[in-house]
Image: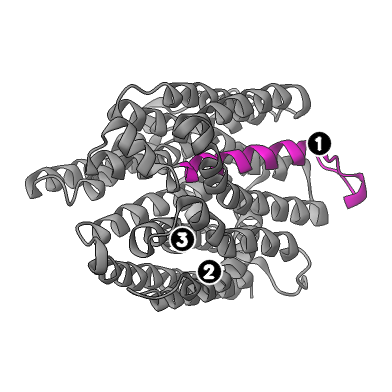
Amino acid sequence: MTFRPQTAAPAAPLVLIALATFLALVVFTQPLTTLQAMTAGLALTPGQQAWIMSGMPLGAACGLLTAGALGDTLGRRWTFAGGLWLTALASVGAAAAPEGWFLVGMRVLQGLGGAGIMACGLGLLGQIYDGAPRRRATAIWAAALGGGVAAGPILAALLLPLGGWRADHWLIAVSSAVLALLAQLRLPESPRTGERVDVLGSVLLILGLGCLLSALTEARLASGAVVAMLVAAGALLLGLFAVREVRVANPILQLGMFREAGFAGATLAAFASGAGVLALMSMVPTLLERGLGIAPLRAAVILLAWSGVTVLAALAAHRLPERITSRHRVIVSLAGCALGQALMLLAHDGASWIAVLPGLFVAGVSNGVLNASLGHEAIQTVAPERAAMGSAANNTARYLGSALGIALISVLLAGKEGAGLFAGWHDAVWASSAIGLVGVAAMSALSGRREGAVQ
């Protein structure tokens, strides 16, 4: 349903969706300041450490399109609340994890729960709000993304002396359950199409993405033959998925949507932001702790120069002049993120932690505007009845990019402890900055094509 003026738009749905989105990003960032404690408590291997970092974004990337299809078919509120319940159950499992691989599995399940939250949260906003209220709602949604990234590492670090790394998972479990109950009571349900969900397509997508991400995560741990088999299997499964989606009556991803330049551009930009700025900034606490010897809590506070600024910039984004379209905002802000990433080259062995502040601040301002603009672009470039699918595709690209980016950066940093850590860090900065610039070029080209078509 649609609400006319901004002042008449209901506040409760926005608050609930923003809090759930905030929580999903708290789950995403949970290991940033607790990985060392988890490693000590469960005797994690290097491979398990990498999987714990990338397990949640892997689960989210694999589950988002399925969650979007479930939302459009069975109801967005139903799927949104289901994602919260799954997050609660997986967090209970993570809190009670007896060993490393069990915790990895729970992180993947947390990602699948986050998929339901992310896919249908933005879709619900597109359903409830329109016009100026929608721009404001997507700005607050984007601020919740940044807020979760900002608060997650600090909250986890604060809980370490109180109950260890498990305490954070217990808090996430309780919070998810409370929000799930409130969502069932206070959010409107979307119209249901009654069509069957493409279960086979979902399985092919999850297995295909899982194989590709596993190949990158295992690149420095497994043999070349194993990695090659994973890549081949992933490519085959995703090829079968594409064929399936063209033929099935109710696909989880309508490939024809990519003919719309605005949708294709927003999806590519989301991937570039995930693989670029989100992945690089997620590894800043690791750099500060291992390279500069800074304590986890202090590293999380320093990261606020990026994540906290992201929140403020996202909240202010809807005040930008309307003549600056969301497409142009995406292009400029993605370029700003690439600049901020490049400034992280100032961090080197023997430098003060102050060296990372310019890059964090520039990337934070740009990332806030980018998140708000991408959210708006994702739901305005698809038909209203496919809002959850459009949102899911955008967030799939973001989480897939972040999982790939984190795995790539982990590979570059691997085995380069001490002074050599910064050599790997500089390689990671160059790689992530290049990804951001490729996103700028792709978005610019697609934006020009769309404007030419309109004319």
Magenta region includes residue 16: yes
**Along the polypeptide, which appears first: circle 1 or circle 2?**
1
The correct choice, above or below, for 424 with respect to 45 in the image is: below
Residue denoted by label 1: 12
Q: Are marks 3 and 2 in contact (CB under 8 Å)?
A: yes
Mark 1: few, some, or many residues within 10 Å (few <14, many ≥20)? few
Amino acid type at image mark 1 = Ala
**Range drawn in magenta:** 1-30
Q: Residue at x 56, y 31 (%)?
A: 172
Q: CA distance from mark 1 to mark 2?
A: 33 Å
Between residues 334 and 70, which one lies in front from this camera angle?
A: 334
Q: CA distance from mark 3 to mark 2?
A: 8 Å
Where is 93 relative to 15, above or below?
above
Residue 131, given in percent of the width and then of the height, sits at: 80, 55
In front here: 191 or 268?
A: 268
Q: Secondary structure at mark 3?
A: helix
Label located before the other in sequence (3 or 1): 1
Q: Is residue 302 left or right of residue 287?
A: right
- Badge 2 marks a residue whose secondary structure is helix
Mark 1: secondary structure: helix
Question: Which amino acid type is shown beneath numbered disc 3?
Answer: Met
Q: Is residue 166 visible?
A: yes
Q: Residues within 10 Å of mark 3 (few under 14, many from 20)?
A: many
Residue 28 horizontal/vertical position (percent): 48, 43
Dominant SS of magenta comes to helix
Locate residue 246: give its quadrant.
Answer: top left
**Pointer 2 residue:** 360
Give the residue pinned by disc 3.
Answer: 281
315 versus 230 height, above or below: below
Along the line of sight, the residue nearer the viewer: 320 or 343: 343
